[in-house]
Image: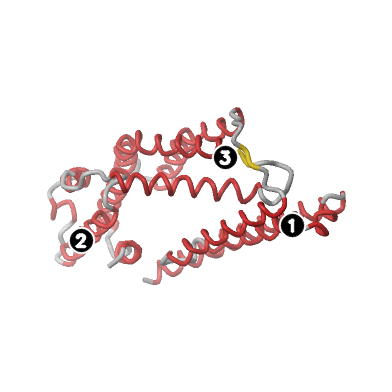
Amino acid sequence: MNIKKMITQNNQLREKLTNENKVYYENLLLYLRFEGIMRDEEKIEAFLLEVLQDILLAQQDGISAKSYFGKEPKVIADDFLVTLPRSLWEGIKLFLLVLVSYAGSSILPSLTTTGKPIDIGIMLITSIYAFIVIMASSKYLASTIYKLTVFIKHKVIRLLVLWVVLMVILAPVLLINFWVHTPFKINVNGVLGIVIIMVLWLIGLFFYLRIADKKFWTPFVFVAFVFGVMGIAARLPYLATFINVKSGRYVYAGLMIFTMVIFYLISYLTIRKMKKETNEH
């Protein structure tokens, strides 16, 4: 069974847990996935699925997860991680994921207009910073978030605290983009910009087709497609002339706003549908 299928099965089986067992297991899952950075993801997901199945079997006999294992979730996770050393290849994959994610989220929106070069140096610096932070803080985050889930019972408050922690960590990314400038810039006007948009489309399509559950990512695909079309239009001579006049800029700005409204609407409907399907399982 591949990783995506294991995660999908995990999400479905987890809904069968009692409230007590669900809290116990999700503490284990959250800690293990954070602490498991740069380790074999397939083995981690297989272990999580195995533990979940054991808990469900014990639950059928009226035994709680805590009584069945006789240990705190963190202890179980640490005992397993001792047998799973960190991997250089997993680190390389993580860095590439950070780089591609940042490039996709920052380059495509900037390609909707012309005249502003892309700072490749900033992109690399930001990606390296994000990677270092992820690696340096993975153990700290794992322990911190685990403690939050143990001591803060209200889910909304936990999410709020987690959001604040992540914002503090990610704030320097905004500062780097605002204050730092490098000479490594490329002009993306004309044909080069169109080629870059198409390459980003192909990369995005490749990853989208490999995702098991595509519903969550569909709104992002919509935005990427519309922004890409707008970027190509801005680089076509006849349309560029229209876009550069005052009325054309208003139409262009209105289209961007309309796209984001549709994005949020599709996202809301998608999340609502996913919740409904989860409750039905």
SS of the residue at dot 2?
helix
Q: Residue furthest front?
A: 191
Task: Report the residue at 50% width, 34% height from top.
Answer: 125
Residue 182 to residue 188: above or below: above
SS of the residue at dot 1?
helix
Residue 250 in view, yes or no: no
Question: Which residue is labeled 3 in the image?
Answer: 120
Amino acid of disc 1 = Leu
Amino acid of disc 3 = Ile
Q: Quadrant of the C terminus?
A: bottom left
Instruction: Please state which of the two labelled residues, at mark 2 or mark 3, is closer to the viewer.
Output: 3
Question: Which residue is labeled 1 in the image?
Answer: 255
Label 1 crowding class (10 Å Cα cut-off): few <14, some 14-19, many 20+? some
Please give left or right for residue 242 compared with residue 143 in the image.
Answer: right
In-front residue for pair 16/178: 178
Task: Report the residue at 75% width, 54% height from top.
Answer: 234
In-front residue for pair 249/228: 228
Question: Which residue is labeled 2 in the image?
Answer: 50
Q: Earlier in the sequence, mark 2 or mark 3?
A: 2
In-front residue for pair 95/70: 95
Mark 2 and mark 3: Cα distance apart in space: 43 Å
Label 2 crowding class (10 Å Cα cut-off): few <14, some 14-19, many 20+? few
Residue 266 to residue 71: above or below: below
Mark 1 and mark 3: Cα distance apart in space: 28 Å
